[in-house]
Amino acid sequence: MNFYWVIDMAKKRKGKIKVLTCKKCEFSFEVGSQDDLDNRGKTWPFVAPMPDKEGNVTITQMAVWKCPKCGYTIRGSIGKTKGEFAGKSKKDQISEKLAENVEFDIEIFANSMGAQKENLEKILVKMIEKKMISGNIDGDTYKP
Ligand SMILES: [Zn+2]
């Protein structure tokens, strides 16, 4: 299972059930219900452009459904999760890597963390923009 798809089950159990409604005919269904599963089309992660203060990125899992009543395309989120890694946090892993003060290939480093290159790149870009780090990105390489 890709970590991006891990939905915080604890939150779900607290009774935060998400209801989606068709904009056209107002048919509504709960995320996780049979109506959801029967009509769900493609899903994709939407990555927030800004990491939070812990260095984690909020990832919203988006999906589309075909309304079972009228056929209209319903678009919404299934849930949100923080991009976190097992064991060491993403922030720690990135901090350690940056502390080495050496060039690295963004894609290879992302893969080593089990992350996606584009997400890591977004974090690095934001850190550079906010002057948290002084390096720059050249193609697929981060240069300190
Ligand atoms: Zn509908």
Image (cartoon, rainbow, N blue to C red):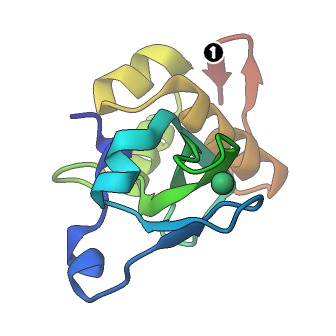
Q: Secondary structure at mark 1?
A: strand
> In the picture provided, is 12 more to the left or to the right than 74?
left
In percent of width and height, residue 133 lies at: 69, 48
State the residue lying farthest toward the right. Answer: 129
Q: Residue at x 71, y 62 (%)?
A: 25
Q: Residues within 10 Å of mark 1 (few under 14, many from 20)?
A: some
Quadrant of the image occupied by residue 106 = top right
Viewer-proximal residue, 11 or 109? 11
In percent of width and height, residue 97 lies at: 42, 37
> In the picture provided, is 5 more to the left or to the right than 131?
left
Could you tell me if residue 123 is visible in this image? yes
Instruction: Say above or below: 40 vs 29.
Output: above
In percent of width and height, residue 59 lies at: 52, 53
Instruction: Say above or below: 123 vs 103.
Output: below
Quadrant of the image occupied by residue 11 = bottom left
Instruction: Say above or below: 113 vs 64.
Output: above
Q: Residue at x 45, y 50 (%)?
A: 95
Where's the C terminus, which quadrant?
top right
Viewer-proximal residue, 36 or 136? 36
State the residue lying farthest toward the front. Answer: 69
Q: Three-letter amino acid code at disc 1?
A: Thr
Specify the quarter for ligand 1: bottom right
Where's the N terminus, which quadrant?
top left
State the residue lying farthest toward the top. Answer: 139
Q: Residue at x 31, y 30 (%)?
A: 114
> In the picture provided, is 135 more to the left or to the right than 120?
right
Mark 1 = which residue? 141
Count of marks, rendered view:
1
Could you tell me if residue 56 is visible in this image? no
Q: Residue at x 83, y 50 (%)?
A: 129
> In the picture provided, is 129 more to the left or to the right than 73?
right
